[in-house]
Image (cartoon, rainbow, N blue to C red):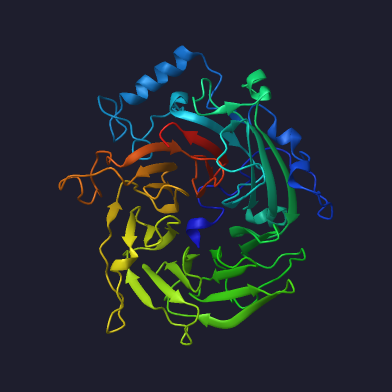
């Protein structure tokens, strides 16, 4: 699918013009994630690879002058009075965007040899609800190398450490002695890689009741390593993958470009069994799939046919229980609220994202797709929505990534009057629910960290790890 290929905005050649790391020994298994060595030490410790806390090394006067010039631009990018809006206003030749460090609690950028356009966060044993800096995070990601160098693709297991807070910090945050001694230290990226020789379209991690981490990838083609299980029921590639949180041993959904969905279950013996009877109903590719956070047999799927469909795995017909036409364009992504399970957010190709109350969705007597009314919708973004996710503990906060190179944070608890509640498509003003805009080049996927309140990781050209003062 063209909107997620390596050529889309990444250019025909390597993204980074630098030497490649030596191939990794995939048989070398660490005892625990904390023991990973930095295989990419030369790659990630140079000044031009790590942007620490938004500091760009220029004199304050020069940076402030540039910011003042940007603020003087109108929304069309022409010189003159007005407000510069990231993702909607154009930069003049030679201008660059510089983050305002006073709006972040934490901000770091980390680079990988090839862009990782899908990733997932791995929960760790370092504690829940932690606010201690420097912070440490673990992730898994799949690379998207240039097609001419597909053999360099890999599944990467990464440890981000040394993630320090911004100068000044926050009253509710703590610092270790190491952070106090050197708040200007660069973050560290350590990794292990498993060669795949194929682009990863989507990757999802799941920790079983035995604290074993299973990782599922949807790839463009078969790969050369020896996975625990290969699902061969799909005839085409796909992008939709999700693990059920309500099955401790592991239950996996996968959807493909033919519109077919399969369920794979882990057995008591540790093996995997795929039910070869597909769930069918979508007339185009399945872009996103998610299990219900509260009902073990229910899942939803979003498709480029513009629909979201709700299914019950117990159905013998393998047909959807509900079909709703939520967009006239591709529905790329969706997110099911973990706090309020009748709320579902979706993002489409036209840049609009919306929130739906599933209690209002009713099956049609004729079987035709229903056309529900969203409880909230926003047309602020002018490019496709590439990722969307509810805050893990606050069902009024949503993070959105879009093709306009931005990650936006929204607070749905902000009340609107009748005039403001109208659809915002085509309106130049910023919606009052918009909390924050973060610039992310080629923004593709984002996730809230489940153990560090308010912390986000977003991927695109590089990884951004940040936390704003607004969340």
- Residue 189: x and y in percent read 68, 38
The correct choice, above or below, for 166 with respect to 333 in the image is above
Residue located at (52% from left, 48% from top): 447
Classify residue 373 as left or right of residue 279: left
Q: Residue furthest bottom?
A: 316
Residue located at (53% from left, 17% from top): 58
The correct choice, above or below, for 264 with respect to 426 in the image is below
Which quarter of the figure has residue 199?
A: bottom right
- Residue 114: x and y in percent read 64, 46
Of 234 and 140, nearer the camera is 140
Q: Residue furthest left?
A: 418
- Residue 115: x and y in percent read 60, 47
The correct choice, above or below, for 41 with respect to 241 in the image is above
Classify residue 419 as left or right of residue 127: left
Classify residue 291 as left or right of residue 271: left
Residue located at (69% from left, 71% from top): 230
Q: Is residue 145 visible?
A: no
Q: Is residue 83 visible?
A: yes
Residue located at (74% from left, 56% from top): 195
Of 42 and 430, nearer the camera is 430
Q: Quadrant of the C terminus?
A: top left
- Residue 381: x and y in percent read 35, 47
């Amino acid at each position: 699918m063209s909107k997620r290929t390596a050529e889309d905005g990444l250019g025909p050649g390597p993204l980074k013009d630098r030497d490649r790391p030596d191939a990794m020994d995939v048989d070398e298994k660490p005892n625990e994630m904390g023991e990973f060595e930095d295989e990419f030490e030369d790659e990630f410790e140079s000044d031009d690879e790590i942007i620490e806390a938004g500091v760009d090394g220029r004199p304050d006067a020069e940076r402030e002058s540039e910011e003042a010039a940007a603020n003087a631009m109108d929304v069309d990018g022409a010189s003159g009075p007005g407000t510069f809006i990231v993702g909607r206003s154009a930069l003049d030749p030679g201008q660059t965007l510089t983050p305002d460090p006073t709006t972040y609690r934490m901000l770091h950028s980390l680079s990988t040899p090839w862009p990782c356009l899908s990733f997932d966060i791995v929960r760790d044993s370092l504690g829940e609800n932690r606010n201690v800096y420097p912070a440490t995070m673990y992730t898994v990601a799949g690379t998207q190398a240039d097609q001419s160098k597909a053999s360099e693709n890999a599944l990467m297991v990464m440890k981000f450490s040394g993630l320090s807070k911004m100068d000044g910090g926050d009253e509710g945050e703590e610092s270790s002695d190491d952070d106090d001694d050197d708040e200007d230290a660069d973050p560290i990226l350590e990794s292990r890689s498993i060669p795949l020789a194929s682009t990863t379209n989507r990757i999802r991690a799941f920790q079983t009741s035995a604290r074993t981490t299973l990782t599922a990838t949807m790839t463009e083609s078969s790969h050369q390593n020896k996975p625990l299980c290969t699902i061969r029921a799909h005839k085409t590639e796909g992008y939709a993958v999700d693990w059920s949180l309500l099955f401790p041993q592991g239950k996996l959904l996968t959807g493909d470009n033919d519109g077919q969905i399969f369920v794979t279950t882990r057995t008591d013996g540790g093996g995997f069994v795929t039910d070869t009877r597909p769930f069918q109903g979508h007339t185009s590719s399945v872009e996103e799939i998610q299990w219900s956070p509260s009902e073990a047999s229910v899942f939803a799927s979003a498709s480029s046919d513009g629909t979201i469909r709700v299914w019950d795995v117990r159905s013998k017909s393998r047909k959807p229980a509900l079909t709703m036409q939520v967009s006239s364009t591709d529905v790329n992504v969706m997110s099911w609220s973990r706090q309020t399970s009748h709320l579902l957010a979706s993002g489409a190709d036209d840049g609009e994202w919306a929130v739906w109350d599933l209690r209002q969705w009713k099956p049609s007597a004729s079987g035709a797709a229903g056309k529900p009314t969203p409880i909230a919708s926003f047309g602020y973004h002018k490019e496709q929505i590439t990722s969307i996710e509810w805050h893990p503990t606050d069902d009024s906060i949503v993070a959105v990534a879009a093709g306009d190179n931005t990650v936006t944070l929204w607070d749905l608890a902000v009340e609107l009057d009748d005039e403001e509640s109208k659809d915002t498509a085509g309106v130049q003003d910023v919606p009052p629910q918009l909390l924050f805009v973060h610039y992310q080049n080629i923004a593709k996927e984002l996730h809230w960290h489940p153990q560090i309140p308010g912390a986000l990781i977003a991927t695109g050209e590089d990884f951004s790890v940040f936390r704003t003062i607004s969340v």
